[in-house]
Amino acid sequence: MKNILKISILVLMIVYSSSSTIAQQVTGKAIYKSFFKVEINFDSTDTNPEVSAQIQKQLQQQMQRDYELVFNNTESHWKQLESLNNGMAQASSGGMVIELVGLSANEILYKNIGEGRFIEGKSMFEKDYKITDQLELINWKITSETKQIGQYTCKKATYDKIVETKNFSSEMEKMTDATDTIKVVAWFTESIPVSNGPAKSWGLPGLILELKSGDIQFLCSQIILNPEDGIDIKIPKKGKEVTEKEFDEAMEKDMEKMMKKYNGNGEKEIHIKIGG
């Protein structure tokens, strides 16, 4: 009788464990709006401050985009949604024209949270790349602060991120590297137990609904959980396979070539910073 009782309890425990696991399987689609702060400094005394302000305003408006995060418990893809603002942002004022190349709607970031890796498809300087590397391990600090985003109660988490920036000489012939530390702030909800979020953010015990990284902010505007038509997580396929470091090195070389091709006249030095 005792053996029968033990078997019954074991079967019940297995059934309960399986049911609990199934109940925790989450799929969904989340739409995020992006907000970019554009900073342009003209190192020239003959530049009208009103011209600079007008250009920054135009670029900031054009760089507002919508993104989609399609996810399950361990995988996701992140991509920009089709819109009139896709691609290049252009602003002009006082005879000056500035163009910024934005993300393409064809570029996809795939994350595998379970394996701690990502694959990112990028097109730069008319070349296709497939960046394959490990996700950054983020040392989040979860605070006691909470706020409401839509119907979800969210907790605040932060970490300090070291970023690299590049400055161009006034002759537009060489670049210098610099580092900066920015505060990253995330608001996540444990009501959606998925360790994921916008762009390459991850590592919290719930979906990140708002993320501010330097001058870039993503805010979730819509969530569809367990959609009836299912989800299709896409993985980038085409392009030269490189690591993130190899991609950065290739971009630096191409940018140096571009600077030499479009050699400046030495009258102005322009620093353009989008986000952090």
Image (spheres, rainbow, N blue to C red):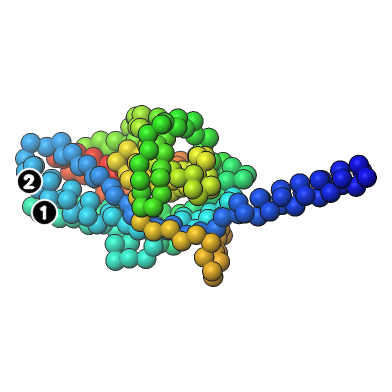
Question: From this viewpoint, is residue 266 visible?
Answer: no
* Amino acid tagged 2: Glu
Mark 1 lies on a secondary structure that is strand
Can you say which quadrant of the picture contains the N terminus?
top right
Q: Considering depth in this image, is 169 or 53 the residue closer to the camera? A: 53
Q: Which residue is drawn at 65% across and 55% down?
A: 22
Q: Where is residue 200 in the image (x, y as percent from the top left)?
A: 47, 45
Displayed quadrant of residue 161: top left
Q: Residue at x 53, y 48 (%)?
A: 194
Position of 262 with respect to 231 (left or right) is left
Question: From this viewpoint, is residue 146 visible?
Answer: yes
Q: Which residue is drawn at 49% across and 53% down?
A: 109
| Numbered tag placed on residue 93 in the rendering | 1
- Above-or-below relation of 266 to 107: above
Displayed quadrant of residue 232: bottom right
The crowding category of the residue bearing disc 2, from other C-alpha atoms within 10 Å (few below 14, some 14 to 19, many at least 20), is few
Label 1 near label 2: C-beta < 8 Å?
A: yes
Q: Where is residue 266 in the image (x, y as percent from the top left)?
A: 17, 39
| Numbered tag placed on residue 189 in the rendering | none
Earlier-in-chain disc, 2 versus 1: 2
Q: Where is residue 244 in the image (x, y as percent from the top left)?
A: 50, 42
Q: Considering depth in this image, is 152 or 45 the residue closer to the camera? A: 152
Q: Considering depth in this image, is 44 or 155 the residue closer to the camera? A: 155
Q: Which residue is drawn at 87% across and 45% down?
A: 5
Query: Label 2: which residue?
Result: 50
Comparing labels 2 and 1, the label whose residue is closer to the camera? 2
* Amino acid tagged 1: Ser
Q: Position of residue 211 (x, y in %)?
A: 38, 43
